[in-house]
Image (cartoon, coloured by chain):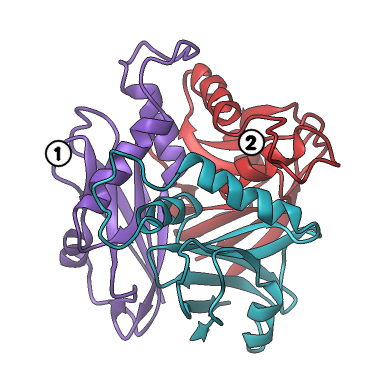
Chain colours: A cyan, B purple, C red
Amino acid sequence: MINQFEIRLPAFGRGIHLITHLIEQNLPQLPDKGMVNIFVLHTSAGLTINENADPSVRYDLEKFFDFIAPENQSWYRHTLEGADDMPAHIKSVLTGPSLTIPVTNGRMNMGTWQGIYFCEFRNHGGRRRLLVTIYG
Amino acid sequence: MINQFEIRLPAFGRGIHLITHLIEQNLPQLPDKGMVNIFVLHTSAGLTINENADPSVRYDLEKFFDFIAPENQSWYRHTLEGADDMPAHIKSVLTGPSLTIPVTNGRMNMGTWQGIYFCEFRNHGGRRRLLVTIYG
Amino acid sequence: MINQFEIRLPAFGRGIHLITHLIEQNLPQLPDKGMVNIFVLHTSAGLTINENADPSVRYDLEKFFDFIAPENQSWYRHTLEGADDMPAHIKSVLTGPSLTIPVTNGRMNMGTWQGIYFCEFRNHGGRRRLLVTIYG
């Protein structure tokens, strides 16, 4: 059984956002055992999994990305779409375009402290689309 | 249904290469709904997804990888295979060894601006092999 | 067919560890064609694939992560769980929480030089849990 649908996120500000509850709200009945793949349909945003408790982890993670991929590097050639654009492409490569999460007993099976992060790397990315594919 | 086959890439120069068309040319009839997994069988090359339009994104991305993982760091121990080898291992860890791309209506379903990047991190990597697994 | 089970790793020291044999020992009969997904149930450890031969690659990779995500950055806010904790979250985002490895003829099908790395980013991470999902 394969089930597939799109989730349209609200327009998030630049930063790292915990969206586990938002994904769960949109999921249909999940299989007993299987996988959920969540795929970002954009090139300047990303998905990752990390600590769902202390929000300072998300704050520091965003700072880290700014630290290793700063704006206005003299050697950037891709500058026409704004100073935040090329760093956003780089950061989205580092986080990756998708997550594959195991399903057990009809629920996404993550560790106690794991949550799904949506990473908005543009200043004004607007509403982003995720494609969810469930199999099992 | 699971379908699996290998793609042998042409010998690319060091750099980031857009290979969406090359993957599509090699795909058999895809299922209505499903997933395509593309797996690099090497440890000094990687796969990622990013902007398919302006080539300067690929240029800047390559520069970025050289910037954070430069050659000839004094603390590298793995130096026998050439100055480009250890940085290539690091960069391939950062991009990751595989992509899982959703399939909808018999086509890989990516965003308008998304393309598949093959990242050749060695100076002379030769012809590389990808293992493609389709399920759906 | 979907098969799912947990692997409890031994308590590894901080560092990058080759665990291909450990995964293989725990795998049941694999399908002829399919995929194995290995998912880390933690937010300060990661999984990746890289060279299985020279251990200096794993040594340099760990050094690299310390180099780009050092401890005690003045701008870290998430500091209560120890100096190694926030860097560990960052590094686990960079490696990613899971691997999806193709299966061919009842075996994980990786390249000759590819091995599975378990990345323990904490000083004393204890015994970690992996969730393995096989489909095919």
Which label sits on residue B11?
A: 1
Along the horizontal axis of the image, is A94 left or right of A53? left
The answer to whether residue C105 of the structure is visible from this angle is no
The C terminus of chain A lies in quadrant: bottom right
Q: In percent of the image, x 71 and y 77: which residue is there?
A: A21
Q: In percent of the image, x 46 and y 52: which residue is there?
A: A91
x and y percentages locating residue C38 in the rendered image: 60, 53
Q: Where, by quadrant of the figure, is residue A125 drawn?
A: bottom left
From the image, tell me which residue sits under label 2: C119
x and y percentages locating residue B74 in the rendered image: 46, 10
User: Which secondary structure lies at badge 2?
Assistant: strand
Q: Residues within 10 Å of mark 1 (few under 14, many from 20)?
A: few
x and y percentages locating residue A109 in the rendered image: 72, 67
Along the horizontal axis of the image, is A134 left or right of B60? right
Q: Pointer 2 indicates a residue of which chain?
A: C
Q: In percent of the image, x 39 and y 27: which residue is there?
A: B87
Q: CA distance from mark 1 to mark 2?
A: 31 Å
Of residues A82 and C65, which is closer to you in this image? A82
Three-letter code for the amino acid on which mark 1 is drawn: Ala
**In the current view of this chain or complex, which residue is farthest to the right?**
C80
The answer to whether residue A71 is above or below residue B15 is below
The answer to whether residue A96 of the structure is visible from this angle is yes
Three-letter code for the amino acid on which mark 2 is drawn: Cys
